[in-house]
Amino acid sequence: MSKSDDDALREKIGALMATGLTTQTEPFPETDREFGHLLAELRELPSDDLQGKLVLSGFVDKPYGPDQMRCQECMYYLVHRKWCDLPELAVPVEPDWWCRLWRI
């Protein structure tokens, strides 16, 4: 994917969230088992089901929770590409977004 493709997809994702896409922010997977179960659910989705990935992973377009967690502090976030490198997601993201697969 080129940078312009990443930018276009990031804009599409942002527009989906800005227009009120309801996602599953809870429950946050507290254990490795819960995290693994969520990853397995994501793997079952068709690879081109962007909206399904966003809904299941709980994407929101702002910092989340009492600690105001965001993609920028997640271990899967690639700063220079503005990209989520978690294989089950693998989508361009903004630094201030968040999803329930967030990890440090």
Image: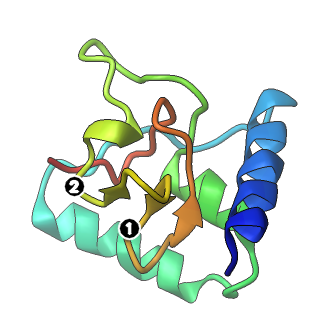
Badge 2 marks a residue whose secondary structure is loop
Would residue 79 appear left or right of 12 to someone viewing this image? Answer: left
Q: Residue at x 41, y 80 (%)?
A: 87
Count neighbours of disc 2 (C-alpha within 10 A) and say few if under 14, some if 14 to 19, many if 20 or more. Answer: few
- Spot occupied by residue 85 in the image (x, y as percentages of width and height): 39, 69
Residue 33 placement (x, y as % from top left): 16, 69
**Residue 100: horizontal and vertical position, in percent?**
39, 46
On screen, 15 above or below 65?
below
Report the residue marked by disc 2. 75
Residue at far top of view: 66
Q: Helix, strand or loop at disc 1?
A: helix
Of the numbered discs in the image, which one, if any, rests on residue 38? 1
Which label number is shown at residue 69? none
Q: Nearer the viewer, residue 61 or 5?
A: 5
Identify the image quadrant of residue 45: bottom right
Q: Residue at x 52, y 46 (%)?
A: 58
Question: Residue 59 at x, y = what percent?
Answer: 56, 44
Q: Residues within 10 Å of mark 1 (few under 14, many from 20)?
A: some
Spatial CA distance of label 2 from label 1 is 17 Å
* Residue type at tag 2: Met
- The answer to which quarter of the image holds residue 66 is top left
Q: How many marks?
A: 2
Q: Earlier in the sequence, mark 2 or mark 1?
A: 1
State whether residue 58 is above or below residue 54.
Answer: above
Q: Which image quarter: residue 2?
A: bottom right
| Viewer-proximal residue among 59 and 80 | 80
The residue sitting at 37% across, 50% down in the picture is: 79
Circles 2, 1 touching at the beta carbon (< 8 Å) = no
Q: Is residue 101 left or right of residue 41?
A: left
